[in-house]
Amino acid sequence: MSLIRCENLAYAYDGHIAVKDLNFSIEDGDYVCIVGENGAGKSTLIKGILNLKKPVSGSYTLGNHIKRNQIGYLPQQSLNQKDFPASVYEVVLSGCLNRLGHLPFYRKKEKQLVQHYLEILQINHLKHKSFRELSGGQQQRVLLARCLCASDKLIILDEPTAGLDPIMSQELYQIIRKINKELHTTIIMVSHDIKQAVNQADKILHINYQQLFFGTTQEYIESPIGQSFIGGSSHA
């Protein structure tokens, strides 16, 4: 069974249809980029996948091997998040909250999980530093580690490189690809940068109030809509 299956799906925002005619499925281990212009319905769709919005029509199904609280989410950073007064270790550890159930304290296995992802994200040397003192790229690595502590099955990243310089952005993209390939984590990434999306993802979902394309990156590059948006760029 697919990890996510959407059939004739539509969501509303402020009483109006924001995105419709969604028909796609995401399999275990996929790396999917959702692309489209500002206001195209990307954020509304993400809220639907996170079960924060109910569809107005159609169906959205999660595979029975994953629960709704087993989705990691990295939202766009706000100024309040950037100034969060906690250590790196505390921020990452907070990602384990859903794993505790009714327990009032973190167990050894949660702490080991934090250590594991600090090392994978190459930020173990920052664990005792204040989150607010870090650079933007370091903060995103911390939040990505937190996201993985919430779930290593499926993570959703909303414009994870927004506000980062090109070097930091490329480093973060490389880490996300490593997580997808080595940890077999399913990635859904929202991006406004279509050229970068085709360099990173295995599949593309292009929406503009409705689904315009869903398929492999190579199929997207060769499609009329892909050609019109990326000018025939090759998939690196």
Image: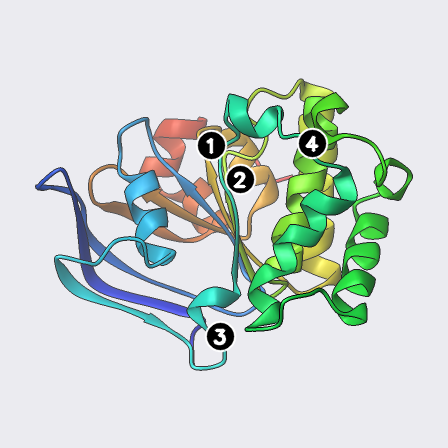
Please give the residue where the numbered disc 2 appears in the rendered image: 198
Please give the residue where the numbered disc 1 appears in the rendered image: 194
Name the residue type under label 3. Ile
Sooner in the amino-acid sequence: mark 3 or mark 4: 3
Name the residue type under label 4. Gln
Judging from the image, what secondary structure is the residue with disc 4 in?
helix
Q: CA distance from mark 3 to mark 2?
A: 27 Å
Sooner in the amino-acid sequence: mark 2 or mark 4: 4
Q: Are marks 1 and 2 in contact (CB under 8 Å)?
A: yes
Name the residue at 77% across, 56% down: 114
Judging from the image, what secondary structure is the residue with disc 2 in?
helix
Please give the residue where the numbered disc 4 appears in the rendered image: 139
How crowded pointer 2 is (Cα within 10 Å; few <14, some 14-19, many 20+) is rated as many
How crowded pointer 1 is (Cα within 10 Å; few <14, some 14-19, many 20+) is rated as many
Foreground disc of the pair 1, 3? 3
Q: Are marks 4 and 1 in contact (CB under 8 Å)?
A: no
Task: Report the front residue among 213 and 146.
Answer: 146
Name the residue type under label 2. Val
Please give the residue where the numbered disc 3 appears in the rendered image: 66
